[in-house]
Image: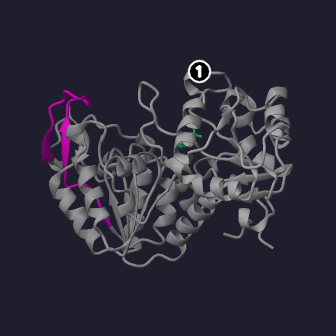
Amino acid sequence: MNKMTVRDIDVAGKRVLVRVDFNVPVDQTGAITDDSRIRASLPTIKYLLDRKASVILMSHFGRPKGKVVNEMRLAPVGKRLAEILGKPVKIVDDCIGPSVESAAKSLKPGEILLLENLRFHAEEEAGDANFAKALASLGEVYVNDAFGTSHRPHASISGIANYLPAVAGFLLEKEINTLGNLIENPAHPFTSIFGGAKVSDKVAVLNNIMKKVDCLLIGGGMAATFLKAKGVNVGTSVVEDETVATAAALIKDADTRKIKLFLPVDVVVADDITAASQASTIPIETILPNKKIADIGPRTVDIFSKELKSSKTVFWNGPMGVHEVPQFANGTRALATVISKLKATTVMGGGSTAEVIDAMGLTDKVTFVSTGGGASLEFLGGDALPGVTALMDKK
Ligand code: 3PG
Ligand code: MG
């Protein structure tokens, strides 16, 4: 990465404003179900504390759309961070304004303050300059460690860098280096697996990764669009009609580039997708008009697994089925298990892929789990991330 990091700037005794992505998944009761994003920020936080900086953390949480939403307060996240660090984390009930300023100014070296959800102010997502300036006034140095949000041109992501010396944290650096290496210098054979619901989210990344991979495996909801492009009847599966032509073009491009592209040969279908749904496994040629695809079938798992086992590099983004519902989780779980046993560089996209890997306890069995869903896709799609562009260049 050609950007300056916390290593390249004097932080000792300074008030350091750190943008983190503490947008962690929670259950219906608001309990944190995966704290990986909090843990991933620890190297930067500890580095700053060791240098007696006062650390001011800022994050968004959910999509409150410019209003205060009590369920989206960051207090539970601050509590979890304090438990993990074994150190108090002060909190305030806003992210700008006089009381926040005095809390920031009175922070002692080695202390931590977590600001309230940035998105309680509409100015955050609007990238408002005055809001960015108000945030910037709280610190002396700005660190971006929020890889998962670095594709958003928001005030706390790219705006603040106009007002403070701006450098990358260790997580941001690691993400950019790992994903950059994946796309620039992969060991071959390189296999990429894509799943999840929408093709439209993945067109750019598929087009870009197509230039690097030897093999593409496509499952999940998006497989229906590819199957339809090949003339398969996919019943009531959700198909983005406007992307069927895109899928057809991607299939043709893979063929021209001599890339092996595999779609499901069998699938698990149901009338609807609920915990009570009756699941049946069938070849793709026999999907009835009233059935929906909900997972890949066992023959597909075998074919995909065989390709994975001969790969030296694997990138995975998106579940193979509706993995939240047990009877439709087998394909996703089976491939996660296969990937965890490979002697290969295995990089997992963020979002739901990261949640599956965490829930199965496989995080330590893969090379890297990205903390960014959308951000990793945009980066691998070849886009410059606003949160990275804004940082100071390495001298
Ligand atoms: C995420 O979880 O995708 C990031 O935290 C960014 O959140 P957003 O998609 O709501 O911008
Ligand atoms: Mg997102």
Q: Name the residue under label 1.
A: 70
Query: Which region shows up in magenta?
Result: 261-282
Q: Say if the magenta span includes residue 273.
A: yes
Above or below residue 76? Residue 156 is: below
Which image quarter is the N terminus in?
A: bottom right
Above or below residue 365? Residue 33 is: above
Give the image quadrant in which the ligand numbered 1 is located: top right
Q: Which residue is drawn at 31% across and 63% down?
A: 339
- The reply to whether residue 356 is in sight is yes
Q: Say if the magenta span includes residue 63.
A: no
Front residue (pair 257, 40)? 40
Q: Position of residue 34 (x, y in %)?
A: 44, 42
Q: Position of residue 145 (x, y in %)?
A: 65, 53
- The reply to whether residue 372 is in sight is no
Say which quarter of the image contains residue 344.
bottom left
Q: Position of residue 70 (x, y in %)?
A: 59, 21
Front residue (pair 270, 175)? 175
Q: Where is residue 166 in the image (x, y as percent from the top left)?
A: 78, 56
Q: Label 1, secondary structure: give it.
A: helix
Which image quarter is the C terminus in?
A: bottom right
Mark 1 residue type: Asn
Q: Residue at x 84, y 32 (%)?
A: 102
Q: Is residue 257 left or right of residue 310?
A: right
